[in-house]
Image: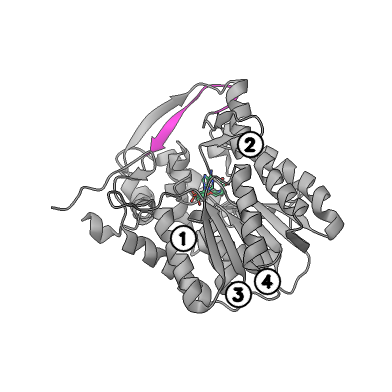
């Protein structure tokens, strides 16, 4: 009998390893069809490599630029009794495809927030001969972080700040819309979220790599952020997560200072909203995401995580133009298509008319739901 697939709080009750393998293979095949990245990176560290934006970046660096890659992620490997997490199969698929293509890759499972993992990465690089990193992608999304010095564990909390928020949220797995309300976060909750999703750990990584002489001359490092439109500001940009992203963005300036002696540079890339394991648990954002996807698809502007990261490497960080285009705050903007005026006007119009009865008609809920189950390796046919 077929198991009924369910996703609750972004976690599915099953995993299809073969589907995870083909997801990764599909992104690799898409990357291989593009022209090679000119003067691209050669040795790349990806923190948060097993899915979403981290996997997209890893595929582009390896299969677009021929880079050696080392990835770190927090995933559970399969045991005799239990399947692993989707990211474990994704990593395995990536390593297998890299080996077939003659590309060096190594993947470590561990808590990227810990000094033990930092030391393990440095030890691996000393032994494996991949050479100092010329690109470090910081793509972690986590609900908690233990401070490596104090040992205190902090949790990220998704809440508005300043005042109470009421609105509608859409369960991407089921299409069900419900009313939600959130009290504003306390100062402690804001500080805790900044500890987890802000820039402190990114800076610790760069300090550790620089201290061990593992950062190449001219190295680049990138962390990812999100801004979004007014409709999502209360829950995201001016909420606890936004405070963490402001901290991350401010940290880019500190890291720049740190690595500028060797002509290194740190950037925050503001990416588009997409269905990933991290994003679907953000209330209110989900309705926006399904409406946005409908508009972007109709305009031929829809990109997945791999396409976004491929554009980042190809058009922004490397290639013929040595100047990296940034906004007035020094950020790379890959949310340019999402934030286009016509896209935002049409998305806002959908959200104004959205009710629990017209979700399927007005939004791309069905497509987003397929993408969400796809993250666990399931196709629409598996769910029929
Ligand atoms: N998805 C979006 O809509 C969106 C938009 C803009 C920016 N971003 C940002 O992109 C970044 C990546 O998010 P994503 O959506 O790709 O998430 P994701 O859930 O797909 O990937 C998160 C990665 O972090 C790893 N990870 C989590 N905790 C870890 C730990 N303790 N140690 C090691 N690895 C750990 C996971 O294993 C996974 O590889 C985040 O900073 C997020 O805020 C996401």
- Pointer 2 with pointer 1, Cβ within 8 A: no
- Pointer 4 with pointer 3, Cβ within 8 A: yes
**Res. 238 in view:** no
Depth check, mark 2 against mark 3: the one in front is 2
Q: Is residue 338 above or below residue 312?
A: above
Q: Could you tell me how many numbered marks the image carries? A: 4
Residue identifier under label 4 = 40
Residue identifier under label 1 = 91
In terms of secondary structure, where does tag 3 sit? loop
Q: Is residue 114 above or below residue 308?
A: above
Mark 2 crowd level (few <14, some 14–19, many ≥20, 10 Å Cα): some
The disc at residue 148 is 2
- Pointer 2 with pointer 3, Cβ within 8 A: no
Mark 2 to mark 3 CA distance (whole Å): 34 Å
Tell whether position 161 is magenta: yes
- Position of residue 33 measured from the top left corner of the image (x, y, whole percent): 51, 78
Q: Residue at x 47, y 50 (%)?
A: 292
Q: Nearer the viewer, residue 24 or 363?
A: 24
Q: Quadrant of the C terminus?
A: bottom left
In the image, the segment drawn in magenta is 160-170
Q: Residue at x 61, y 52 (%)?
A: 120
Mark 1 crowd level (few <14, some 14–19, many ≥20, 10 Å Cα): many
**Mark sitting earlier along the chain (4/2):** 4
Mark 2 to mark 1 CA distance (whole Å): 26 Å
**Mark sitting earlier along the chain (2/3):** 3
The disc at residue 66 is 3
In terms of secondary structure, where does tag 4 sit? loop
Q: Residue at x 47, y 66 (%)?
A: 94
**Mark sitting earlier along the chain (4/3):** 4
């Amino acid at each position: 009998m077929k198991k009924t697939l369910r996703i609750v709080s972004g976690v599915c009750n099953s995993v299809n390893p073969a589907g995870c393998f083909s997801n990764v293979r599909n992104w690799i095949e898409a990357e291989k069809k593009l022209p090679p990245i000119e003067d691209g990176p050669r040795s790349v560290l990806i923190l948060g490599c097993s899915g979403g934006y981290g996997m997209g970046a890893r595929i582009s660096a390896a299969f677009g630029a021929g880079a050696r890659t080392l990835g770190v992620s927090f995933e559970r490997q399969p045991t005799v009794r239990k399947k692993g997490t989707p990211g474990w199969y994704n990593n395995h698929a990536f390593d297998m495809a890299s080996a077939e293509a003659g590309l060096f890759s190594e993947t470590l499972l561990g808590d990227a927030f810990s000094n033990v993992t930092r030391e393990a990465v440095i030890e691996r690089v000393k032994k494996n001969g991949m050479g100092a990193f010329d690109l470090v992608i910081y793509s972690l999304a986590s609900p908690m972080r233990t401070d490596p010095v104090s040992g205190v564990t902090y949790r990220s909390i998704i809440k508005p700040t300043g005042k109470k928020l009421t609105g509608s949220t859409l369960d991407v797995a089921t299409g069900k819309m419900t009313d939600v309300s959130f009290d504003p976060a306390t100062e402690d909750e804001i500080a805790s979220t900044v500890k987890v999703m802000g820039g402190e750990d990114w800076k610790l990584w760069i300090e550790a790599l620089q201290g061990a002489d593992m950062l190449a001359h001219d190295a680049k490092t990138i962390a990812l952020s999100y801004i979004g439109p007014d409709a999502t500001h209360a829950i995201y940009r001016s909420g606890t997560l936004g405070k963490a992203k402001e901290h991350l963005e401010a940290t880019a300036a500190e890291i720049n200072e740190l690595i500028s002696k060797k002509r290194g540079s740190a950037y925050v890339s503001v990416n588009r909203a997409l269905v990933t394991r991290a994003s679907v648990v953000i209330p209110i954002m989900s309705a926006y995401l399904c409406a946005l996807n409908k508009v972007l698809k109709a305009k031929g502007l829809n990109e997945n995580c791999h396409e976004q990261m491929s554009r980042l490497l190809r058009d922004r960080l490397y290639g013929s133009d040595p100047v990296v285009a940034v906004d007035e705050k020094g950020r790379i903007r890959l949310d340019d298509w999402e934030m286009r005026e016509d896209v935002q006007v049409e998305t806002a119009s959908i959200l104004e008319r959205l009710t629990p009865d017209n979700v399927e008609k007005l939004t791309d809920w069905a497509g987003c739901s397929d993408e969400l189950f796809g993250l666990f390796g399931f196709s629409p046919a598996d769910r029929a």
